[in-house]
Image: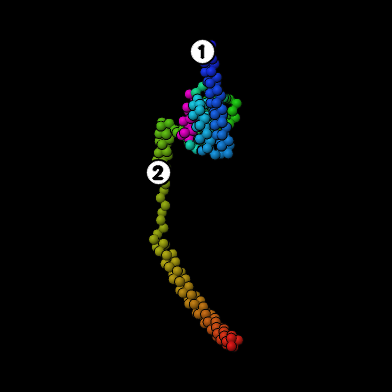
Amino acid sequence: MRIRILVLVSFLACFSASILKGQNLNNALRQGNNAYKERYYGDAIAHYKDALKVDSSSVKAKFALADAYYQKKQDSLAMNYYQDMLQDSLSRSQKAEVLHNIGNLQMRAKDYKKAFETYKQSLILNPNDDDTRYNLVLAQKLMPKDKKQPQQQNQQNQQDQNKQKKKQQDKKKEPKKQEPPKNNQEKPKQDKQKQQDKSQKDQKELNKKQLEQLLDSYKANDEKTRQKMQKVQTYLKNKDKQKAKKKW
């Protein structure tokens, strides 16, 4: 009888501990999700870690923690958790989501070839995911194009060299143009020099006239300015006298 009672008490204790563990796990996940929605990713990470302390095998806690690291742009930590989850027993849809996020990290790292392969694996598991399909096409477009094979490149270089040689040969075959006699060249040069000398002389005379006009204008303006200043000084003197009278 006592043995049965002890077994029952042990069962109830384990059951209670399991319920408490589940409650603590759910509370930590709920707090983490609330912080995640408010974009407090640091707080969310702390809560998800608490959840994993309660249950280190929790798929929800691992996935949520990896997502929080992803949003905080701590890509290496996010990648570690995502890749670790692939070792767990996941459903096809869960594994497809993990691969989708791994592909996103690879896209962010500009490793488009790996991202393309990862998205392809994700679509095999979940062919109806339009987001993954879109990302797959995008990764394919961003993938660097394959370089030409060495043999093709050598052929192209050889063709370019042949074209260059042909151009040089054709240029050598062209008849040389005859140059006009030197006497015919010297005469236009002399005429041109005379024109330049005359133009400079005219320019000097013009500048001299302009300068004289400018000086005359300055003198006239200077005389007007001097007369105005005298008037102003006379006005100020009279004004000062008036003020002095008022002060008495």
Q: Is residue 214 magenta?
A: no
Camera sees residue 9 = yes
Disc 1 residue type?
Ile
Q: Mark 2 points at which residue?
A: 168
Instruction: Assess disc 2: are there few (<14), some (14-19) or many (≥20) residues with their C-alpha within 10 Å of its C-alpha.
Output: few
Q: Mark 1 points at which residue?
A: 3
Camera sees residue 134 = no
Q: Which of marks 1 and 2 is nearer the N terminus?
A: 1
- Residue span colored magenta: 75-87
Instruction: Report the number of numbered marks.
Output: 2
Circles 1 and 2: CB atoms closer than 8 Å = no
- The local secondary structure at tag 2 comes to helix
**Residue 133 falls in image quadrant:** top right
Question: How are the residues colored?
Answer: rainbow
**Above or below, comparing residue 150 to residue 221 in the picture:** above
Residue at horizontal 39 percent and vertical 40 percent from the top: 165
| Image coords of residue 103 (percent x, y) | 51, 31
Residue at horizontal 45 percent and vertical 69 percent from the top: 196
| Image coords of residue 53 (percent x, y) | 49, 29
Residue at horizontal 48 percent and vertical 77 percent from the top: 208
Disc 2 residue type?
Gln
Kindly report which numbered mark, 1 or 2, lies closer to the viewer in this rendering.
1
Which residue is the extreme one toward the front? 2
Residue at horizontal 41 percent and vertical 36 percent from the top: 157
| Image coords of residue 184 (percent x, y) | 42, 62
Q: Real-space Cα distance between discs 1 and 2? A: 108 Å
